[in-house]
Image (spheres, rainbow, N blue to C red):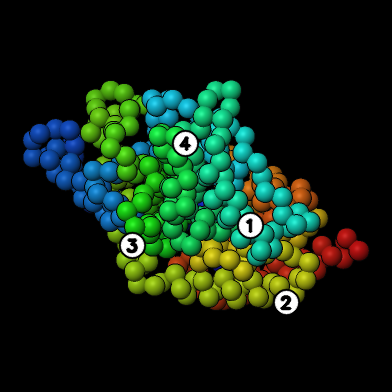
């Protein structure tokens, strides 16, 4: 019997050999990075090397990298700065929960034609995002001061606009009077799969990313701060991370994060994800040929090279995940960061899909080690189950 096939890389990527080696080596460095003796300086050197490696991946300076315990913590650190400047925080309805749960303003969802988002609908969705940026939001708590807008959606893989983290149209529109809107951009899924690019000199105010999404260790994230102000620490104490996040640094995790970032940047530059994108096309074409009722979200627009989100209305995503798990394939229904819950995708509902379709969506996310045999085996197993579903529904 052939072994299991892991197709849930957007949930977490396997630990890279480079990250493992860096972490094992860091275990033998006994010093505290805050100590001034030789052992402490050695540990500090590992932290600063990793900071430079992460900075190189995302195109910032090392001092703009703030290590955290997760992307969720990085998001909270960014949102906390809103209170310092007044106004409220708003997240697009398609954002990851780590940002969306903080939202203090209700932003409208896009209603696609007949509840289904076609390629034209995706274009409308992108235009809607830009239009939202120009809207002068207000609430009973005051004007919106900080907006969350991800570079790539974790469930659908759809990019915000043309591979850019925050396009000029966003930045220029995030202004009301003389006070600019700040932007926190989630690049957790884009970093390490595609180049992190910008329009000219424009940058978001903050970016968040996670180590385990790029083959680093779990429990490590980073906030990238492009503003001129240091975030006020929400974890206070010894003043580590240049006073921005107290607590003795997780040297082992940070070393693994840095090594993974360097390896990921090398893979992106070397075009290794091009092969994965071809596998995704093989997967979708094979499934589409055998399952005429299945909807592929954003198939005609630019997406992450590894991500396929599709729905067969009436066939619950949870059932598909279980059936594929029993068949030896690890996939997911939406984001994995909801304590094991499987429910209708809020992202698809915000994009205009009806509840039945949103509850039928699954996500298959490929990795660099995924093979064509893996993809075809999954397609064969899934199509067999789809045929059984059709027979029961008839």
If you read the primary sequence from the N terminus, does the residue marked by circle 2 or circle 4 appear first?
Answer: 4
At a point 39% along the width and 72% down the height, the residue shown is 271
Could you tell me how many numbered marks the image carries? 4
Please, which residue is most extreme toward the right here?
A: 394
Above-or-below relation of 372 to 82: below
Disc nearest the viewer among 4 and 1: 4
Residue 158 in the figure: left or right of residue 310: left
The CA span between labels 4 and 3 is 37 Å
Image quadrant where residue 65 sits: top left
Q: Secondary structure at mark 2?
A: helix
Q: Secondary structure at mark 1?
A: helix
If you read the primary sequence from the N terminus, does the residue marked by circle 1 or circle 2 appear first?
Answer: 1
Residue behind mark 2:
289
Locate the C terminus by quadrant. bottom right
The CA span between labels 2 and 3 is 35 Å
Q: Secondary structure at mark 3?
A: helix
- Residue 129 in picture, x, y percent from top left: 56, 49
Residue behind mark 3:
265
Disc nearest the viewer among 1 and 2: 1
At a point 78% along the width and 71% down the height, the residue shown is 292
- Residue 1 in picture, x, y percent from top left: 61, 71
- Residue 82 in picture, x, y percent from top left: 43, 30
The CA span between labels 1 and 2 is 27 Å
Q: Which disc number belongs to residue 124? A: 1
* Viewer-nearest residue: 377 or 155: 155
Quick check: marks 2 and 3 in contact, CB under 8 Å?
Answer: no
């Amino acid at each position: 019997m052939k072994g299991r096939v892991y197709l849930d890389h957007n949930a977490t990527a396997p630990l890279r050999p480079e990250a493992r080696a860096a972490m094992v080596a860091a275990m033998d460095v006994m010093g505290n990075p805050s100590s001034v003796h030789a052992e402490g300086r050695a540990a500090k050197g590992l932290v600063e090397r990793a900071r430079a490696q992460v900075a190189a991946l995302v195109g910032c300076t090392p001092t703009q990298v703030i290590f955290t315990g997760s992307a969720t913590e990085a998001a909270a650190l960014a949102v906390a700065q809103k209170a310092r400047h007044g106004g409220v925080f708003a997240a697009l309805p398609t954002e990851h929960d780590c940002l969306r749960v903080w939202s203090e303003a209700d932003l409208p969802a896009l209603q696609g034609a007949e509840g289904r988002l076609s390629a034209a609908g995706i274009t409308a969705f992108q235009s809607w995002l830009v239009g939202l940026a120009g809207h002068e939001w207000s609430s009973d708590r005051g004007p919106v001061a900080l907006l969350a807008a991800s570079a790539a959606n974790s469930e659908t893989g759809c990019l915000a606009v043309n591979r850019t983290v925050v396009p000029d149209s966003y930045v220029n529109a995030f202004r009301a009077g003389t006070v600019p809107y700040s932007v926190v951009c989630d690049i957790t899924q884009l970093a390490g799969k595609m180049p992190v690019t910008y329009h000219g000199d424009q940058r978001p105010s903050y970016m968040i990313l996670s180590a385990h999404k790029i083959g680093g260790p779990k429990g490590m994230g980073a906030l990238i701060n492009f503003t001129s102000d240091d975030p006020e620490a929400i974890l206070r104490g010894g003043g580590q991370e240049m006073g921005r996040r107290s607590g003795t640094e997780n040297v082992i995790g940070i070393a693994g994060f840095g090594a993974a970032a360097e390896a990921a940047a090398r893979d992106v530059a070397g075009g290794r994800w091009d092969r994965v994108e071809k596998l995704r096309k093989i997967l979708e074409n094979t499934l589409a040929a055998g399952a005429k009722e299945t909807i592929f979200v954003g198939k005609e627009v630019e997406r992450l090279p590894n991500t396929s989100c599709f729905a067969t209305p009436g066939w619950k995503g949870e059932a598909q995940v279980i059936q594929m798990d029993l068949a030896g394939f690890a996939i997911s229904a939406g984001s994995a960061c909801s304590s094991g819950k499987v429910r209708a995708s809020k992202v698809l509902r915000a994009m205009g899909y009806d509840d039945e379709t949103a509850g039928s969506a699954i996500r298959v996310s490929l990795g660099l080690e995924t093979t064509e045999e893996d993809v075809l085996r999954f397609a064969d197993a899934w199509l067999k189950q789809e045929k059984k579903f059709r027979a029961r529904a008839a």
